[in-house]
Image: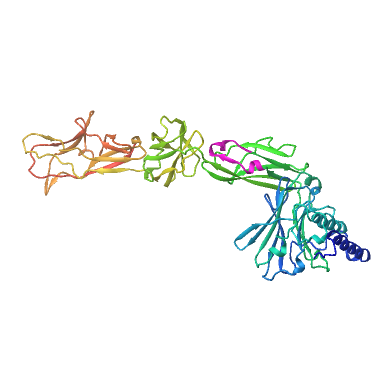
Amino acid sequence: MLRKERKVFYRFIFLLGLFLLGILFNSQQVSAADWPTNESESDILGGHVHAKLMFEKDHSQEYTAVGDTVTVTTELTKLDDIPLDESYDQSSMVILYPNVEQGLELIGQPTYMIKNGNATNTGEFVPDEKILTQNVIDMGFNMYADLYKDPFHYTGVMTPIKVKETDDLDDFNQDPRYSDTFSLKNILVNKGTVVTLSYQVRVTQKAVDVNVGKLFSFHSVIYDSSLNGTGDYDLTNGFLTAEMPGIQAMGVAFDQQSKNQLLDVKDAKAVHLSGTWHDDPTAKVTQTLTANGKDFQVPQNSFKDDGTFDMTVDLSSIVTKAAEVPVTIKLEDDHGQSASDTATLNFQQTNVAPEVQLVAPAEGEVVNSYSSTREIPIQLKWKDDDSEQVTLSYILDSGSEIILAKDLANPTPGEWQTYDGKINWAEALAIGMHHAAFDVEDSDGAKASKTTEFSINVQPDILGFKTVGQEMIFPEMYISNRLLQSSPETGENVVITDTLNDPNLWRLTVKQTSDFTSGAKTLKGAELSFVSETQTASITNNPDGIILPVEQATTNDYSLIQNEKNHFQLNIPSGNLTGNYSADLEWTIVAAP
């Protein structure tokens, strides 16, 4: 600690002088190239405080690139509730800034944060302009740096210590005044109290010139006022070093303008990205741009010889609503090096998204279809509040987007509009369930927040009887001595389903498979025929059956033609006995010849 009879300035000169004398007499005990220790954490101040030096980069942790912003933090944690001894009232944690010759440029001012339980507070360093800082760092520490052949000259800040007027510092009574309110002894009292001392640096182009392949080193050191009777730097336990990966011969980084972009969804068609890069001139370099896991083509001539890159890309295929979208630029060369950086773009949606609804088929409905089906009619409703046009589209299963209607006019914004159309496909869909999802996008680039969909159940094609009447009933006739002729009371209900819709591939036939009988009696000479416009064909007298005419009744159904000119006819000659006669008919669908 500082004694009344000794000035701070003189004390450092005195201590360092003694140390230098020790070096002159014991040079074999000192490394000519390195500091005594290069640990990133240690227990200090009598073992009551744990100190840790660390850094965090805003880009890749595997390598360092021009444009990287690095936050360097020294963290001090009180390990117990034992108060620090009075001998530590002039102990200070000294934060050493890296030299600009390393290609590291200081950003802003350092911060001093205190956390005690849930309470947080902001501390203060000794003001830069005070003589104490100059003595401790500029003169004191840099003499050690020279001794250990550190090529850099350091500046920095220090936590406050107890200073009295009798310490005879020339600026003691000058503003800003010395204060030990935030000294380590006064702050690190309770177990768990954490002091965080941080600063930021930016990697400059100079780092490429002087630091390729070399590690960057950050240092902080405790000045322990209990050491050697009058205090000294604790270079054995309190000299902390954190090493950051060096500059490789390749690097890439988005600039802050790209990283901090706040974009509207409708601007996703033209997103501007820029930053810095460098590479080995002898290597062949390829560039890859990825957004939300999808690759996008890097425009030609985006990467300039001056170490910058600049491009405009269309991300509208992946940006349909407000979201955070990670965009990664990656460089790779034929020497095996790679570098990448990621910017998270924040897309917001200022215009109101359109809406879409299914009318027919209904939302969620399952529509049965067949292998030969190539289209399904649909009806949609859509609404948009603030755009002049919309585009309707759909996706079948997980395929590509298909446009239903492009640039539909929006005559009455905010009101529902109706669209009638159809979805179709060129190749047969596989047997099973399929899904059609419909979307709407307005002319400002906003898509519906919710799509609407129905399912298609594809079944094998069908060719077969849908219905066949059970009976063909003729009216009652009275026996006579002349030929009787009659037609059925009603038409025969014969319907065939053909989902291929090609009646040229088949024929409907009918044949009589038994005589007309009533118990043991047979209706002699009876003949069943089918009368058409061109002929009367006997069914009874054609054991192989006859071909009957059909017509399309519905989309997939065909029915037997029956009218005044096309009908069944029964002829019964005279000489038969009374009875309730019946015969069997066989209906068949046969392949067309």
Query: Does residue 544 show up?
Result: no
Whole-percent x, y for residue 330 in the image: 67, 45
Q: On screen, 43 above or below 346?
A: below
Residue at image coords 23%, 38%: 542
Q: Nearer the viewer, residue 445 or 174?
A: 174
Answer left or right for 487 relative to 296. left
Along the horizontal axis of the image, is 440 left or right of 74? left
| Residue at (79% x, 68% y) in the render | 226
Q: Within the magenta stretch, is there residue 269? A: yes
The relative height of residue 475 versus residue 72 in the rendered view (above or below) is above
Residues shaded magenta = 256-272
- Nearer to us in this view, 577 or 106: 106
Query: Which of the pair 367/135 is nearer the observer?
Result: 135
Residue 514: image location, x then y, percent: 19, 45
Measured from the top left, where is residue 562 in percent x and y?
22, 34
Residue 53 image-quadrant placement: bottom right
Left or right placement of residue 480 versus residue 459 in this view: left
Q: Quadrant of the C terminus?
A: top left
Which residue appears at 63% of the width and 36% of the height?
Answer: 312
The figure's colour scheme reads rainbow
**Residue 509 visible from this viewpoint:** yes
Q: Position of residue 32 (x, y in %)?
A: 88, 60
Q: Extreme top residue here?
A: 534
Quarter of the image that includes the N terminus: bottom right
- The quarter of the picture where residue 541 lies is top left
